[in-house]
Image (cartoon, helix red, strand yellow):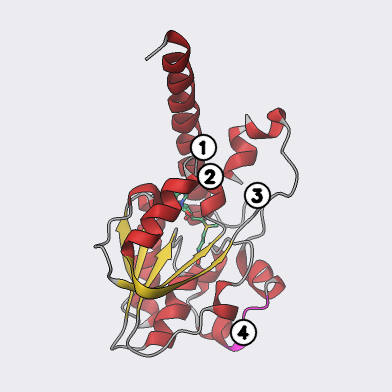
């Protein structure tokens, strides 16, 4: 490996570690102090903006709604059926996973994955309060802690944009999906190349 390649890899590893620290910090705040001021939409206001069914919001645990963060509504196209196994990538405090769990019913399963232990703790408490079997596994979307060929539908809401290794995330999603499995995600893409000031700002990336 040349000196330049090693320098670049070290620089990338250091940027990735800074980004991970900022994401952990920011989403711990969303989990524990959801009334705070964030660069992104949160809570019931966000869910209503993204057309979540108000009847489902009325039924969901208030703590799952308060710490909800997302960029859209992955349920509009998920077409979940009873008995299916769903993966919720970056499951946060659990609102999306709980809505999915109501759709697949007790014969199905919803596996949430989240980097943040505080979020997983919230998701487990909210799953209990909602009477659903949503699980939360602490782990990274770049290395999904789920077996190969085991998921019918993967959902995700505003999560893949947070990754430093998006191709790896997509490869992981295809690894865990069963043949014929489906993906219903809402995320952020930019049609324009972002300026270096934005790309190098961990606070903006983490948002
Ligand atoms: C926008 S929120 C999604 C919220 C969620 N769908 C809900 O129902 O409230 C993004 C979540 O992705 C998690 N996250 C960020 N980077 C991650 C990674 N590399 N692997 C797994 N989860 C990650 C964050 O901790 C946060 O809980």
Q: Residues within 10 Å of mark 4 (few under 14, many from 20)?
A: few
7 or 130, nearer to the observer: 7
Sequence-first tag of 1 and 3: 1
Q: In whole angstroms, how far apart are the C-alphas of marks 2 and 4?
A: 27 Å
Q: Residues within 10 Å of mark 3 (few under 14, many from 20)?
A: some
At x 62%, y 29%, the residue is 200
Q: Which is closer to the viewer, label 4 or label 3?
A: 4
Give percent across and percent down for residue 167.
Answer: 47, 47
Based on the picture, tell me whether residue 125 belongs to the magenta stretch.
no
124 or 70, nearer to the observer: 70
Do we see residue 114 in this rendering?
no
Q: In whole angstroms, how far apart are the C-alphas of marks 1 and 4?
A: 32 Å
Secondary structure, mark 4, is loop
- Residue 204 as seen in the image, left or right of residue 67: right
- Residues marked 2 and 1 touching at CB (< 8 Å): yes
Q: In whole angstroms, how far apart are the C-alphas of marks 1 and 3?
A: 13 Å
- Residues marked 3 and 2 touching at CB (< 8 Å): yes
Confirm if mark 4 falls within 8 A of ligand 1. Answer: no
Q: Which mark is residue 158?
A: none
The residue wearing badge 3 is 38
The residue wearing badge 4 is 53
Q: Range of the magenta residues?
A: 51-55
Give percent across and percent down for residue 183.
Answer: 48, 69
- Residue 120 as seen in the image, left or right of residue 163: left
At x 61%, y 37%, the residue is 203
Q: Which mark is residue 22?
A: 1
Q: In whole angstroms, how far apart are the C-alphas of marks 2 and 1?
A: 6 Å
Sequence-first tag of 4 and 3: 3
Confirm if mark 1 falls within 8 A of ligand 1. Answer: no
Secondary structure, mark 3, is loop
């Amino acid at each position: 490996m040349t000196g330049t390649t090693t320098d670049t890899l070290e620089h990338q590893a250091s940027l990735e570690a800074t980004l991970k620290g900022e994401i952990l910090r920011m989403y711990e705040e969303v989990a524990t102090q959801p009334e705070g001021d964030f660069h992104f939409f949160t809570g019931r206001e966000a869910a209503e903006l993204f057309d979540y069914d108000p009847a489902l919001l009325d039924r969901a645990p208030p703590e799952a709604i308060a710490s909800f963060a997302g960029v859209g509504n992955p349920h509009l196209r998920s077409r979940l059926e009873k008995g299916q196994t769903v993966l919720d990538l970056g499951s946060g405090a659990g609102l999306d996973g709980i809505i999915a769990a109501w759709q697949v019913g007790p014969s199905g399963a919803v596996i949430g994955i989240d980097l943040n232990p505080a979020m997983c703790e919230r998701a487990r408490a909210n799953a209990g309060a909602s009477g659903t079997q949503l699980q939360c596994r602490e782990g990274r979307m770049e290395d999904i802690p789920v077996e190969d060929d085991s998921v019918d539908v993967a959902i995700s809401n505003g999560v893949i944009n947070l990754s430093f290794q998006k191709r790896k995330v997509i490869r992981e999603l295809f690894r865990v999906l069963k043949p014929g499995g489906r993906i219903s995600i809402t995320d952020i893409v930019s049609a324009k190349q972002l300026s270096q000031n934005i790309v190098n700002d961990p606070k903006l990336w983490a948002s």
